[in-house]
């Protein structure tokens, strides 16, 4: 199975950190009459599996009384050759049932699917938030901060083991992680609830709706996220973006500040607040925030990639090249920096350098879908050089 970096969409905002103290959201953010609430997926819709899917799982996965056997059988099924067609699609935020029936999904969706499968099989499992470095993707001029979650299947209790054997592997729980770099870097993680996962699901869907100009639907998803997990700060950052693009600057500022009251390390909420300060004539306050953020992010190659992509979007190719080169200097193995540099070189007409960087991007890509995409571009550029 080709699996992915999880996209937890936060529109130029931050992933959550430690569990914040309970702070009630301002009434203006949760009872807004400017937007019309539209029904969205319920919690049951997101996590449930159909009877047909359950039957397929039961046929494929061992129902041994020993939960260790069931766990291993489930993992083998998820990663079996018959599922090799399942591929990475960052924007595909799907329910457990839709993920099972589709060939493309992001890791949030895959984790939800695996959780629902394990729950049906009687396994105790928990979601975990993995604290990867700030990492952005670009879509239609928006910057999306990605996050990552994985699934921890808890080892059987002593009573479970006693039913089958007096010998038990005490190495601990089994972690199913769909991001190969996450395991390699051994990032810090923490257990999070179903309700937080549901809020992440709603945030992804809301971000997609906002990008598509469906603002009432976006508000509906963000409102559902707040109802599911009122202390998940990323929702308020997203909501702030929605208000800003609707010229509701006072409410946008309220949303950003509430996100920061929940997590003062929410760097992207700070960045959005700086942008809002600029729009409202508070240049000094904006500059102070940006200087502090630049200092914190200067050693993060993903930040340089995000700045490079921003320069590309603005057709400032020389600036983009400098940012992508900085990212490569910080970490040569990130394929996105090579791809960005290839695009910038292509736009200034340097086909040889663009081809070289595409080859580096293909070399360092994790997923087959990415490698195929780069391979196709390499073939196209090579054909141009032969003309």
Image (cartoon, rainbow, N blue to C red):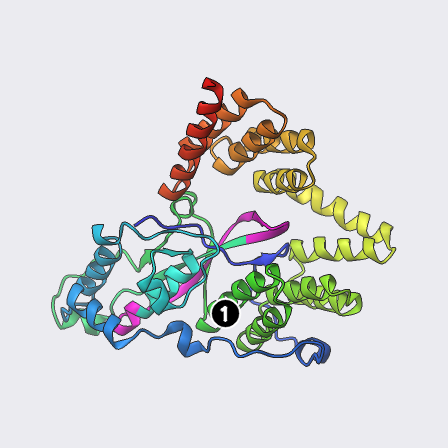
Give coordinates of residue 269: x percent, y percent.
68, 58
Q: Which residue is mark 1?
A: 196
How packed is label 1: few (under 14 Cα within 10 Å), some, or many (20 or more)?
some
> In this image, 118 relative to 266: left or right?
left
Residue 58, position as x, y percentages in the image: 18, 70
Between 249 and 38, the residue placed more toward the observer is 38
Left or right of 79 in this view: 146: right
The chief SS type of the magenta part is strand
Q: Is residue 153 visible?
A: no
Residue 166 rendering spot, x and y as whole percentages: 13, 65
Q: Position of residue 254 (x, y in %)?
A: 75, 69
Question: Toward which corner of the image does residue 21 lie, by quadrant?
Answer: bottom right
The residue at 31%/64% (across/down) is 101
Residue at the image point whose x is 35% and y is 42% from the top: 368
Which picture quadrant has residue 14? Answer: bottom right
Q: Which residues are magenta?
A: 117-145
Residue at position x 65%, y 75% in the image: 23
- Seen at 88% across and 55% down, the residue is 281
Residue 126, quarter of the rendered image = bottom left
Of residues 378 and 232, the one nearer the viewer is 378
In the rendered view, tell whether residue 254 sits above or below residue 275: below
């Amino acid at each position: 199975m080709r699996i992915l970096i999880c996209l937890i969409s936060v529109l130029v905002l931050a992933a959550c950190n430690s569990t914040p103290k309970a702070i009630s959201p301002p009434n203006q953010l949760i009872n807004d009459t400017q937007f019309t609430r539209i029904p969205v997926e319920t919690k049951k819709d997101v996590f449930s599996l159909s009877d047909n899917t359950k039957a397929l799982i039961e046929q494929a996965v061992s129902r041994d009384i020993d939960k260790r056997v069931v766990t291993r059988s489930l993992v083998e099924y998820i990663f079996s050759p018959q599922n090799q067609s399942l591929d990475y699609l960052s924007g595909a935020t799907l329910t457990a049932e839709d993920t099972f029936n589709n060939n493309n999904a992001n890791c949030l969706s895959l984790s939800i699917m695996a959780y629902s499968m394990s729950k049906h099989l009687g396994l105790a499992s928990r979601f975990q938030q993995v604290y990867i470095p700030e990492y952005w993707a670009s879509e239609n001029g928006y910057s999306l901060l990605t996050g990552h979650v994985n699934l921890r299947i808890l080892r059987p209790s002593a009573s479970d083991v006693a039913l089958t054997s007096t010998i038990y592997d005490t190495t601990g729980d089994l972690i199913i992680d769909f991001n190969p770099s996450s395991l390699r870097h051994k990032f810090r993680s923490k257990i999070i609830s179903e309700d937080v996962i549901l809020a992440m699901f709603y945030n992804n869907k809301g971000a997609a709706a906002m990008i598509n100009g469906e603002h009432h639907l976006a508000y509906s998803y963000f409102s559902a996220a707040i109802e599911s997990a009122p202390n998940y700060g990323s929702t308020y950052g997203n909501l702030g973006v929605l208000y800003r693009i609707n010229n509701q600057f006072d409410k946008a500022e309220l949303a950003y500040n509430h996100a920061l009251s929940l997590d003062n390390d929410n760097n992207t909420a700070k960045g959005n607040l700086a942008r809002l300060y600029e729009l409202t004539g508070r240049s000094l306050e904006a500059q102070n925030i940006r200087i502090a953020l630049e200092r914190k992010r200067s050693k993060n190659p993903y930040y340089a990639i995000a700045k490079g992509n921003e320069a590309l979007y603005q057709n400032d190719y020389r600036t983009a090249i400098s940012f992508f080169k900085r990212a490569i200097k910080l970490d040569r193995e990130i394929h996105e920096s090579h791809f960005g540099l290839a695009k910038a070189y292509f736009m200034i007409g340097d086909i040889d350098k663009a081809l070289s960087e595409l080859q580096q991007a293909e070399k360092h890509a994790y997923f087959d879908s990415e490698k195929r995409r780069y391979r196709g571009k390499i073939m196209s550029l090579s054909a141009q050089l032969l003309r």
